Amino acid sequence: MSGAVKSNVFGSSGTVAAAAGGLSWQDVVTASTVTVESNRGYFINTTSNACTVTLPASPAVGDQVILLDYARTWDSNAVTIDSNGNNFQGDPDTYTVDYDTAGQGINIVYADSTKGWIPNSDIANALTASAPATQKAIFGFGTTGSNTGVTNLVNSSGVVASDTSAVGTARRSPAATGYGLDKAIFAYGYTSSAVSMSNLVSNSGVVASDVTGVGTARAYAEGASYGGDKGIIAYGEDNLSMSNLINSSGVVGSDVTGVGTARGRLAAAEYGGDKAIFAYGYNGSNVSVSNLVTNAGVVGSDVTGVGSARRTLAAAGYGSDLAIFGFGLISGNTGITNLVTNAGVVGSDVSAVGTARAYLAAAKYGGDKAIFAFGNDGGYDNTKNLVNSSGVVASDATGVGTAREQIKGAAYSITA
């Protein structure tokens, strides 16, 4: 209650301030979208469709919202939270927050601009948000017989753009990975000798000048993103077993003593939403082993490989949480591929589609697809092969850009 207090038997007068009266419960929501208000409760009925719930744009500290699964159907039609420019559990609004458990209830409270909305129920506290999907890709560096630093951007439809003039030291066989949700980095490589340097790529695909490297100079290492917003570069020649973690700002960490078979000329990709896998390679002979990387960047021991042992192949994520390894060199070039589950299990060989080649690159694009491009098929190549969200490799498409080998690719940008 609130308002003026009139004369009474106690002789009191003045004004009574408004008091919290609990949440106001609203009618059942059946629409596919709803914008909610602070300090209210909502029954969300997803019997017929999923629902995106947009939270208040300007919440105050202590504001509360409760959402309940009206018909126990969130497992078939999930509720997605749009935090409307604010953080959710400390993650930015660009993260996807889904609730997909039947009978689930969400009680969230706004803390501050740092953590944003924080779940206050047992089920909600178990939630792990997923990073937004990258949409574009970049291929860079390599050799045409002479080292180069040119790059080629790939749009969200898988179209490879013409050459962008080189920035940074021309070199071949660097490593590349995404970092910081929407950016990329090229690092290490070979000029006339192995080098330790990096070049950051902005979320608009602009390559920055050289940054003096950290860690052992090497070529034929590989990189992959992990943990949603970080990267890892590992292994390399001459038959090294070490890794360097890259934080969400693109800073390369010092060497971490490796785990697993020392080797170079391998491939790596993100899988499982927040983990990475390194597989195959060469240490005097071709190998077929893999090493899984946790979402904390810890490299696991060898897992006996599946599929043909080979080197100078490429790998990329595809789908929402899967990966694919493809092409490479056995005794001759090959185009076989191996799919990786979201548990990091490498599948058996899938028959080749497209020109058999080695020393190529791959990257994720379009949110859930992958692209293999460039390489050497007996000569320098700029062929590309798109991979759909089911892991099916398409036939050759004519490439754009300078044909070259020993090139690398990475995903960047969460904007299509």
Image (spheres, grey):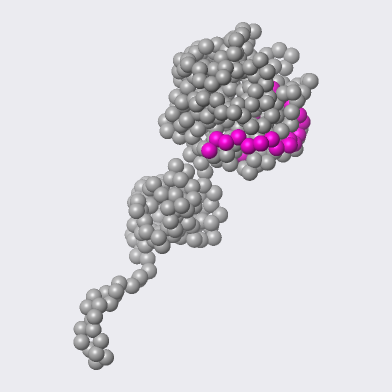
Q: Hey, which residue is sitting farthest bottom in the picture?
A: 9
Q: Magenta span: helix, strand or loop, mainly?
A: loop
Give the residue drawn at x 46%, y 45%: 92
Where 367 sits versus 74, above or below?
A: above
**Does residue 77 appear left or right of residue 314 in this picture?**
left
Residues 251 and 285: in front is: 251
**Does residue 406 appear left or right of residue 259 in this picture?**
left
Residues 158 and 150: in front is: 150
Q: Hey, which residue is sitting farthest left in the picture?
A: 7
Give the residue drawn at x 46%, y 26%: 206
* Residue 157 located within the stretch drawn in magenta: no
Q: Position of residue 413 (x, y in %)?
A: 46, 32
Q: Hey, which residue is sitting farthest right in the picture?
A: 284
Q: Position of residue 45 (x, y in %)?
A: 40, 54
**Quick check: can you spot residue 31?**
yes
Quadrant including the N terminus? bottom left
**Does residue 271 appear left or right of residue 82 in this picture?**
right
Quadrant including the C terminus? top left
Q: Position of residue 331 (x, y in %)?
A: 74, 14
Give the residue drawn at x 53%, y 56%: 125
Q: Position of residue 278 (x, y in %)?
A: 67, 31
**Quick check: can you spot residue 315?**
no
Where 279 sits versus 90, above or below?
A: above
Q: Hey, which residue is sitting farthest front in the picture?
A: 212
Q: Which residues are magenta?
A: 249-275
Give the residue drawn at x 50%, y 17%: 166
* Residue 268 located within the stretch drawn in magenta: yes
